[in-house]
Image (cartoon, rainbow, N blue to C red):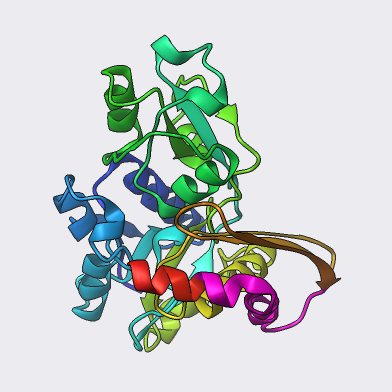
């Protein structure tokens, strides 16, 4: 096989993720080449993500590069990947999940403020809604950019604190003070590096299967199935956390309305089987989630 072209966004974190995938492929004896691609989400750093049609905003340009065969593999933070992909593309492998949780990073001036009094900068509907559910009177600002840029904006007075994926901090080995916030249930597939490729490229699929982490794959299929069935094409504040012990699935899911004052949770322990994500989503919908989703669809 010729050198495998690995497409990635240009951010330092995205390139790190692509290089991690490249390293795994090289261990199998194949040559690789990193191909940076600028995404729409990176081109526009001013609009909040939820006003840009968030689905696929960071993945669309890599999809196009795949379909044009400019790259062989697109490497993503899997939480950014839409649950419905172009018909010729699929998630061909995932690496083992590392740091799925969200963390709070404060400015130096807000180190001693109680959580309920913090102003928060985030462009994530999920983080915003989950935070308001705990602290209804919070002031919010939108924020964009990579991890270092966001921390700089906080330090320059945009807000008291921001909410970040722990994976970004750990993978970049950043010297940052942070605190875990357990009530911010993670996004589906957060903390997972995913590889997308063309279905027709069966030779490459066989290579990527060898770097796939099966337990992580099963968990993210459940989380993404849960997300897909709940959303119905509409972006919403949804959290999902799946872990496995042997063949037993431990799942937590949450749906919150945009105002943060309506919430439905699910907690399940069940033997693994196909389509569990749909089963869990249906339970949410039947327990008040259907009304919340209808409300969200009228507001976005």
Residue 147 visible from this viewpoint: yes
Nearer to us in this view, 222 or 14: 222
Quadrant location of the N terminus in the rendered image: bottom left
Quadrant, the C terminus: bottom left
Rendered position, 105 above or below 87:
above
Residue at 29% in and 23% down: 152
Magenta stretch holds residue 275: yes
Residue range (magenta): 271-292
255 horizontally vs 128: left or right: right
* 269 lies left or right of 236: right
Q: Residue at x 61, y 35 (%)?
A: 181
* Residue 208 appearing in the image: no
Q: Nearer the viewer, residue 241 or 88?
A: 241
How many numbered marks appear?
A: 0
x, y percentage for residue 202? 43, 85
Instruction: Tell me, yes or no, whether the highlighted magenta stretch contains residue 12.
Output: no
Q: Residue at x 66, y 66 (%)?
A: 219
Residue 123, image x, y percentages: 34, 46
Tell me: residue 185, above or below residue 238.
Answer: above
Residue 113 location (% of width, % of height) = 52, 15
**Residue 55, picture quadrant:** bottom left
Image location of residue 209, percent across then percent down: 55, 73
Secondary structure mainly formed by the magenta segment: helix
* Above or below, comparing residue 130 to residue 111 in the picture: below
- Relative vertical location of residue 91 with respect to residue 251 in this rendering, above or below: below
Quadrant housing residue 197? bottom left
């Amino acid at each position: 096989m010729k050198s495998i072209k690995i497409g990635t966004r240009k951010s330092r974190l995205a390139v790190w993720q692509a290089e991690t995938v490249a390293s795994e492929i090289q261990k199998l004896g194949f040559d690789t080449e990193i191909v940076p691609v600028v995404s729409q989400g990176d081109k526009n750093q001013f609009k909040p993500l939820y006003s840009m049609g968030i689905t696929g905003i960071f993945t669309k340009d890599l999809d196009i590069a795949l379909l044009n065969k400019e790259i062989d593999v697109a490497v993503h933070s899997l939480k950014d990947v839409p649950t419905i992909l172009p018909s010729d593309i699929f998630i061909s492998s995932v690496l083992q999940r590392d740091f799925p949780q969200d963390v709070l990073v404060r400015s130096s001036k807000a180190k001693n403020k109680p959580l309920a009094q913090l102003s928060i900068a985030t462009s994530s509907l999920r983080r915003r809604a989950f935070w308001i559910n705990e602290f209804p009177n919070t002031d919010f600002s939108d924020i964009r950019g990579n991890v270092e840029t966001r921390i700089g904006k906080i330090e320059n007075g945009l807000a008291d604190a921001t909410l970040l994926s722990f994976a970004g901090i750990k993978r970049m080995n950043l010297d940052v003070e942070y605190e875990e916030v357990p009530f911010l249930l993670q996004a589906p597939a957060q903390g997972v590096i995913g590889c997308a490729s063309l279905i027709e490229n069966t030779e490459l699929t066989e290579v990527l299967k060898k770097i796939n982490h099966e337990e992580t794959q099963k968990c993210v299929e459940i989380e993404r199935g849960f997300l897909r069935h709940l959303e119905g094409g509409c972006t919403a504040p949804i959290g999902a956390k799946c872990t496995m012990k042997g063949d037993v699935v431990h799942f937590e899911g949450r749906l919150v309305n945009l105002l943060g004052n309506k919430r439905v949770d699910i907690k399940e322990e069940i033997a693994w089987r196909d389509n569990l994500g749909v089963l869990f989503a249906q339970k949410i919908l039947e327990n008040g989630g259907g009304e919340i989703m209808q409300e969200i669809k009228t507001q976005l």
